[in-house]
Amino acid sequence: MPQKPVRIAPSILSADFSALGAEVEAVDAAGADWIHVDVMDNHFVPNLTIGPMVVKALRKHTRKLFDVHLMVTPVDPLIPAFVEAGADTLSVHPESGPHLHRTIQLIKHHGKRAGCVLDPATPLGAIEYVMADLDLVLVMSVNPGFGGQAFIESQLAKIAALRKAIDALGKPIDLEVDGGVNPQTAKQCLKAGADALVAGTAVFAGGPSNYAANIKALRG
């Protein structure tokens, strides 16, 4: 399959939390394709971020796709709330519940896009038998939990392997990368086969007047 044009998904984890609505509007106007929402529970990952109420409040500030990354466990009980709040894609970790296939089916039952997230040590085999049901695979190029971490180079081989697996399957599955993405590592990710990039610090650095240039720089 021909590779899709790159989609840039600014992570609001790096935005100004005192003005999230305005920040979402600013990155939307600056050329963001998706809005990435990092949901952390201080249990599955060592940080606590936002819940469905914030997603619902932000929904009126943009029509762009809400790319919601659920770093929570157990994950299934929270899926309906994020659906109701306005999530478009809900991505989960294989480790975040006992039955990954059932979790994916729950997301699909609500008519939403289903994604799976592979942490740096999680092998491709963890999603081998559910990949055909997915709309997105997200490769974490840092350990989840905090923004601003350095890119883990070993994940480039995983991105390349996933590119081959997705192409062999022949389904339009998005291949997204999150963690340490900047103009330099973005080029490496795209060369390996990624077609969607999450970036926090690299997008939000310098304030709203820089957002358009920052997003453009990530497109290569």
Image (cartoon, rainbow, N blue to C red):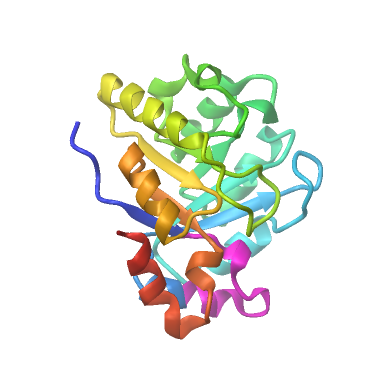
The x and y percentages for residue 102 are 58, 22
* Residue 201 percent across, percent down from the top left: 56, 66
Does 91 sit above or below residue 151? above
Which residue is pictured at 39% across the width and 58% down the height?
8
Q: In the current view of this chain or complex, which residue is farthest to the bottom? A: 209
Residue at 23% across, 40% down: 3
Q: Which residues are magenta?
A: 10-25
As displayed, is residue 210 above or below residue 170? Answer: below
Which quadrant of the structure image shows residue 131?
top left
Q: Residue at x 49, y 31 (%)?
A: 109
Left or right? Give the position of 56 relative to 217.
Answer: right
In this rendered view, identify the residue nearer to me: 175 or 112: 175
Q: Is the N terminus in the top left, top right, bottom left or bottom right quadrant?
A: top left
Q: Is residue 159 magenta?
A: no
Give percent across and percent down for residue 61. 48, 73
Asked whether, in this view, residue 92 is left or right of residue 40, the answer is left
